[in-house]
Image: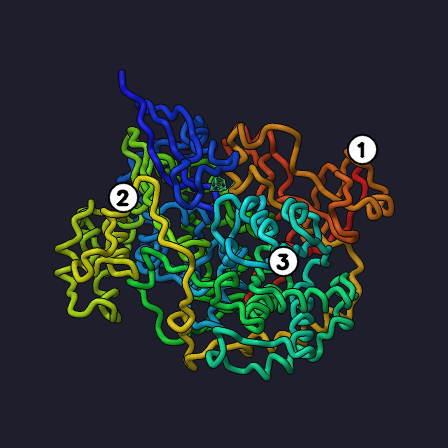
Amino acid sequence: MSEPSIVHRACPFCEATCGVAITVDGDTIVSVRGDKEDPFSQGFICPKAYGLKELYEDGDRLRRPLKRTGSGWQEIEWQTAVNEIADRMIAIREKHGNDAIGMYTGNPVVHDYGALLYRPVFQRALATRNLFNSAAIDTLPKIVQTALMFGRPFPTAVPVPDIDRTDHLLIIGANPVVSHGSLMSMPNAPGRLKGVSDRGGKVVVLDPRRSETAELADEHHFIRPGSDAALLLAMIHTLFEEGLVSLGAAEGLTRDLDEVEKAAEDFSPETVSNHCGIAATEIRRLAREFAAAESAACYGRLGTCVQEFGTLASWGCDLLNILTGNLDRPGGVMFTQPAAPIDAAFPPTKGFEINRWQSRVSHQPEVGGLVPSSTMAEEILTPGDGQVHAMFLLMTNPLRSAANSTQLERAFKQLDLIVAVDFYINETTQYADYILPTPSPAEHEHFDIGLNYLTVRNMAKWSNGIGAAQGDLPHSWEILATLGARLMGFEGMALSDIDDFILRQYADAALETNIQWQDLTTDEIVGKLDSPRGPQRLVDLLIRLGHYGDGFGRNPEGLTLEKVQASDHGLDLGALQPRLAEIINTDSGKIELAPPTMIDDLPRLQDRMRQTPDSMLLIGRRDLRSTNSFTHNLAALVKGPDRCTLQINPKDATRLGLVDGQSARITSRVGTVVAPVVITEELMPGVASLPHGWGHDAEGSQMQVAENHPGINSNVLTDDQAYDVASGAAILFGTPVQIEPAPQ
Ligand code: SF4
């Protein structure tokens, strides 16, 4: 009989990265508990962590690669699958050109360091302009805004609220009590938020829904969807008008302050009040209190991004932080110092250009090599040079996450080839020609690369896999490296040789602009990296070249992967430290306070302010037990009453003739759904809410638990042609809809 062992790792189900302790007996996961010795999470977990066990055990989870045949699915060896896929992709490229293959990456990639580190290599091999990902759905405005203001690619310049020291936290369009922080990685969001109030500070929430975070806050205001940018500009207007602008650490490091003052002139609190639904006196008070706080942080997330003025709203949040001296100061917003900085290997060039090219059909701007995910369907459906004929899907279910899913489904049905790296036959992968499953998160090791730019404390944590037998399932990096090599013409090359080649590419790139450790050579780096092949070596390289690193012996006390792995529960690298000067990477060497992309978009905002909404506006919502759509196939996370309901204010329900518990028909420009009604004062009048990621009644998907809890696919309603003009991101929150009682 084997002795149970305990495996420590970070939970992979959201950005909080809580430490978990998994008790394993042979191939069985006995339990999942919070790791009390994890210095970051100190034992905190939420109910989703248990999903590690359920996902590992799920009978629907694929454990062999599948190939579509005329009569269904056939199991196939993964090397055979990769060879067949490569042959078909090469044939498509030869016939239609490189852009004929699109790629879409889902957010689980963030929790799989192999996928994250080998994706750039694979994308280079694909050499297509049609790269889409989940961030191009829900984060694109933030990516554009931080790139234009700080001159750096995402996520290397995202100011993160220093929540554990702040005196005043203004939360706009975010629900961290449920999401546990996004672009603000922090375990125990409820405890940390409560901590602000407990030490005499204040938490203020602006949201069209009295969310779980609003319930816990000191103050909540309803705000009309899409009006955050106007509200923030009115607060900035107040700062200038009342002489409250004080740049603090940013003094001498900004450009165009006068342009911002001029831009804000047209947005007095009295002018925007009606549009936002917040009284002018309250807007002025909010601005004064933010400016007067010892330290303050403005945090905007999904609600500020997936809306009509996402880039302007993201800009407004950081302007408010900068103009009140709260950028780069303890208790304000600061830049995390990651232990394994990806920019050690891919240093950004000076300045960061967006819009280097536009999407083929609707001419949306390119941002960091990405185009808005809402353009995917039109790029597949519209004939002509550059039309997408094949899609490579990396851990994603876009038919439930992207706007106008009915149109996207029509597009996917006409593709010549779909390859999915996924462990479910879901609403999207049902249309794949090949599905390549990878081990479940509990089974593979991990080190957070992307999220380490966004943590509210500096930290490093190695995640172990449980060491269970995985059959011949390849890891994601093996799929990407092998397939990428084939696409680059390296036929018959052993995986070990491919990986050595990739490692040298990383090392060469790192040395090109490395100034921290002088006289390093690629040979020395490669010679001293004795971790196993694969992503471990790349992480070791990034750690040793990074801020805390040993510089391959030049700083013997510094960090190596071995040292991180030796700390079973993770390393606390301390509170966030000021580092603004090293972050700024614009051509001017200053923070660009008034990029033309934002200034040029202001007349559109003013136009919108002059209009009176004549429809109900639909927003999404998140709940504690739901993240990616696959979590709906985990019984522990979907039990209880139906959570996929249409929430609506009693005044609207009465006006529209809706009855609590009965069904409503909801119609937008692109689709109609029917959902059960919940009447609640939690919603602002004029606004209705339906959660996203549901709709598991597709005939071809094979997820039994999800099929028994199907819910409604809200992206039948979201409109791919309605978008934030500055970034091209589709509007997912604030969709105009008609709502009426559904026939009984
Ligand atoms: S908050 Fe929950 S889902 Fe997120 S990392 Fe922690 S335990 Fe996992």
Eyeballing the image, is 57 above or below 531? above
Query: Type of residue at label 2?
Result: Gln
- The secondary structure type at the circle numbered 1 is loop
The front one of 661 and 494 is: 661
Q: 106 and 7: which one is in front?
A: 7
Give the image quarter of residue 68: top left
CA gap, disc 1 and disc 2: 59 Å
Query: Of discs 1 and 2, which sits in the foreground?
Result: 2
| Percent x, y of residue 621 | 63, 46
Q: Is residue 248 above or below residue 143?
A: below
Q: Residue furthest front?
A: 200
Which callout, 3 or 1, points to the residue nearer the camera?
Answer: 3
Q: How many marks?
A: 3
Left or right: where 627 falls relative to 560 = right
- Mark 3 lies on a secondary structure that is strand
* Front in this rendered view, residue 481 or 384: 481
Would you name the residue on which mark 2 appears?
Answer: 565
- 561 with respect to 718 (left or right): left
| Residue 446 in the figure: left or right of residue 430 | left
| Residue drawn at (78%, 40%) of the image | 679
Residue 744 is labelled as 1
Question: Which quarter of the picture shows residue 583?
Answer: bottom left
How packed mark 3 is, by other alpha carbons closer than 10 Å (few <14, some 14-19, many 20 or more), is: many
| Residue displayed at 33% across by 33% down | 7
Q: Secondary structure at mark 2?
A: helix
Amino acid type assigned to the residue bearing label 3 in the image: Ile
Circle 3 sits on which residue? 172
Which tag, 2 or 3, sits closer to the chain's start? 3
Can see residue 381?
no
Q: Residue at x 77, y 68 (%)?
A: 280
